[in-house]
Image (spheres, rainbow, N blue to C red):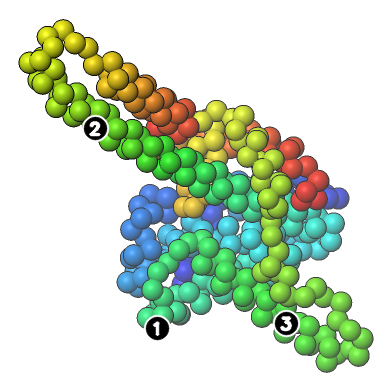
Amino acid sequence: MTTFALARLGAPEAPAATAPECDLPARALRGDVAAWNALISRHNHRVVVALLARGVPVSRARDVAQDAWLKLIEQQRAGKLAELRLPSLAITQAIFLSIDAARRDLRERAVMSSSPADAADPRDLADERMLSDERLRVAERVLSRCTPNARRVFELAYAGDGLSHAEIAARVGLSTQRVRQIVCEVRKLLRDALAGAFA
Amino acid sequence: MSAAHLLRASLEAYVAFELTESDAALVEAHAGECALCASRLAAAARLEVAFEAIANASEAGRRGRRGRSARASAALCAGVAVAASAMLLLAPRSHAGEGERTFEAPASALADATSAVSDSYAFDAAAPLARD
């Protein structure tokens, strides 16, 4: 079996960051292993965090994420993958796998014990909304008080492509250190504004 | 990192992908055995995922505003062009007939239109980072 780069990267500035993001999905769809590795390095952590956020134990989240990537690669090799929108596709795949695993657990518990299973309904893993409209409005107010620079840095850090701080710095013309500082500051503002919502 | 429970900063750094591999392994090992820290880690992960939703919404909003602004600018530019054309069409006839006659209505329409165009550019400049 091909070995894919699923190891955690020690720093936010991932080696994969040197590859142009726009080329990677197209190359991966053609079966380019290096492109798959770069995409996995870039997006795997988001998949893991998405699983953690949905209640998947940390001991299992990394394995489920790895299985999700392998599933996507299998689909690509079978010609079943028409497009590769990441990280959303990998997250969706990982959530499906975690739901399957949770169902298996429920069945096993039901077999092992006559008492009803106490695990949560696995459908909750997929259905849970992370942010209500009201909280989104609160967040919007916070962002509206930030400078356009800070807001853009935050968007680049969290929306879409999973850019590293160094890539964001290059894009907006700031130092990597300043980008890191801005991301921390905006995160703190949002965390304070949304305090309690995610405890 | 605390031996008893993980620090909030460590959990936040973990979900933000800011820990070294060895520190991340420590977080995972502890959260794998400690229910309280596992629960706090899940909360930190939910917040991190919420940040993604917020960033996506913010970006979508900015694109929407820029799109609306661009459409408004295009409409106003078209208005300016129409007003300018009208002036060009009217000007020779008026000069031929009435000498010093001014064209207040088209001129004021043009001024309104150009000022509105300027406003829309000013609005655009305030929103995105491109001009920073």
Q: Viewer-proximal residue, A162 or A145? A: A145
As drawn, the label of residue A78 is 1
Query: Measured from the top left, where is residue B131 in percent x and y?
Result: 39, 28
Instruction: For mark 1, name the chain.
Output: A
Give the label, 3 or 2, closer to the camera. Answer: 2
Mark 3 or 1, nearer chain start: 1
Neighbor class of circle 2 (other Cα within 10 Å; few <14, some 14-19, many 20+) is some
Query: Measured from the top left, where is residue A125 in percent x and y?
Result: 70, 69
Query: Measured from the top left, where is residue A126 in percent x and y?
Result: 66, 69
Name the quadrant of the N terminus of chain A.
Answer: bottom left
Q: Are marks 3 and 1 on the same chain?
A: yes
User: In which quadrant of the rendered view does residue B30 lie?
Assistant: bottom right
Provide the secondary structure element on which disc 2 rests.
Answer: helix
Residue type highlighted by circle 2: Val
Instruction: For mark 2, name the chain.
Output: B
Residue type highlighted by circle 1: Ala
Residue at (33%, 33%) from the top-left corner?
B76
Residue type highlighted by circle 3: Arg
Residue at (77%, 87%) from the top-left corner?
A107
**Is A34 above or below relative to A172?**
below
Q: Is residue B128 visible?
A: yes
Q: Viewer-proximal residue, A111 or A129? A: A129
As drawn, the label of residue B82 is 2
Q: Is residue B25 visible?
A: no
